[in-house]
Amino acid sequence: MVRRNREIKIILTAVLAAVILLFFLLPAVLPSRGIRAAGPLVVDQSGVFTSGQVSQLEQAAAELGGRYAMDIVIVTTDDAGGKSAQAYADDFFDYGGYGVGDEFDGVLFLMDFDNGEIQISTSGSGIRYLTDDRIDSILDDVLAPMQAGDYYGAAQSFLDATAAFMAAGIPSDQYNEPESGGNALTWFEGILGALASGGMGLSIFAGTRKSYRGHPRRAVFDYQKNSLVDLAVASDADNLVNSFVTTRRIPRATTTRPGSSGRSSTHTSGSGRTHGGGGRRF
């Protein structure tokens, strides 16, 4: 009996040791999202880059992403599959397995030759680094070479401008602003609201009409006939005695919103993740 208990203790100790060892080894075995994506950082589906240019862009994107712990991705396409440039960029990033860490930090630059647009999609810390104003500035730098047909130069301009803003850090007044539209009414809600408003209006009208019917009509007193004072109009012409005009300057309201330079507009992609970004036609 004592020997059997000793064997059970040895087995339990061995199992416990194996569990502890597996606990420490598991993080090293499972794939990590801490460095970069396993997929290529330059996906030239349109064939606008040479193999040498792809290698150079891939190296530059990897270095920039490694410096800030995020994935920097460049994509070209001739077929957006019926999607908008924004939806295609977001989905390519999400379903392509890109993004570092729990917030999927990264930035994707898309040359969409199908829709004729360039698009930037940001995720995680990429949203905070690249505010709306910064994205507009990057698109300004990229647009000229795109329109000139210098697609490699456009990709380089994207990387250079993005690197400069990353080096500047996250703006102190940065904030995320979800896109409006969550409060929009559906067609069913609109019809239901119209019917409810119409029913309420008819109810008020009927009640008011009923209340007027319940009161006898009062006789109208003829002031002109029964008055002791002559109220007849002296003349058909009206004489203006005097007039005064007062003028006052009304200041124009300003439309400038404080802190708008630090705004990062966000939206929800098809996968349910939060993205920022912006685009431009070329």
Image (cartoon, rainbow, N blue to C red):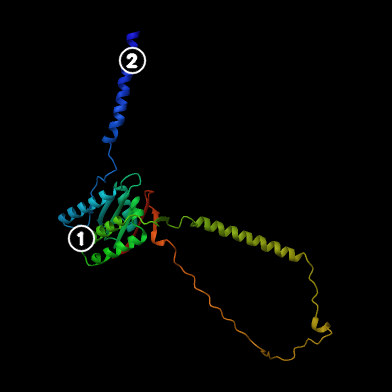
Residue 110 in view here:
no
Q: Quarter holding the C terminus?
A: bottom left
Q: Report the amino acid beneath label 2.
A: Ile
Q: Which mark is residue 8?
A: 2
Q: Residue at x 33, y 23 (%)?
A: 16
- Where is residue 40 shown, x and y percent of the image? 23, 49
- Based on the displayed image, in which of its 4 quarters is residue 163 positioned? bottom left
The local crowd at label 1, few if under 14, some if 14 to 19, many if 20 or more residues have their Cα within 10 Å, is some
Apparent side of residue 247 relative to residue 270 in the rendered image (left or right): right
Q: Nearer the viewer, residue 148 or 243?
A: 243
Could you tell me residue 271's position as x and y percent?
37, 48
Q: Nearer the viewer, residue 12 or 67?
A: 67
Cα separation, mark 2 vs mark 1, equals: 68 Å
Please tell me which residue is depicted at 33% across the width and 60% down the height of the picture: 135
Q: Position of residue 226 (x, y in %)?
A: 83, 82
In the displayed image of the protein, which residue is found farthest to the top? Answer: 1
Q: Secondary structure at mark 1?
A: helix
Q: Residue at x 74, y 63 (%)?
A: 211
- At which x and y percent is residue 191? 54, 58
Residue identified by numbered label 1: 152
Sequence order check, earlier mark of 2 and 1: 2
Left or right placement of residue 180 versus residue 8 in this view: right
Residue shown at 23% from the left, 51% from the top: 63
Instruction: Give amino acid for label 1.
Output: Tyr
Question: Which mark lies nearer to you, 2 or 1?
Answer: 2
Q: Secondary structure at mark 2?
A: helix
In the figure, residue 117 lies in which quadrant? bottom left
Position of residue 5 relative to residue 189, above or below, is above
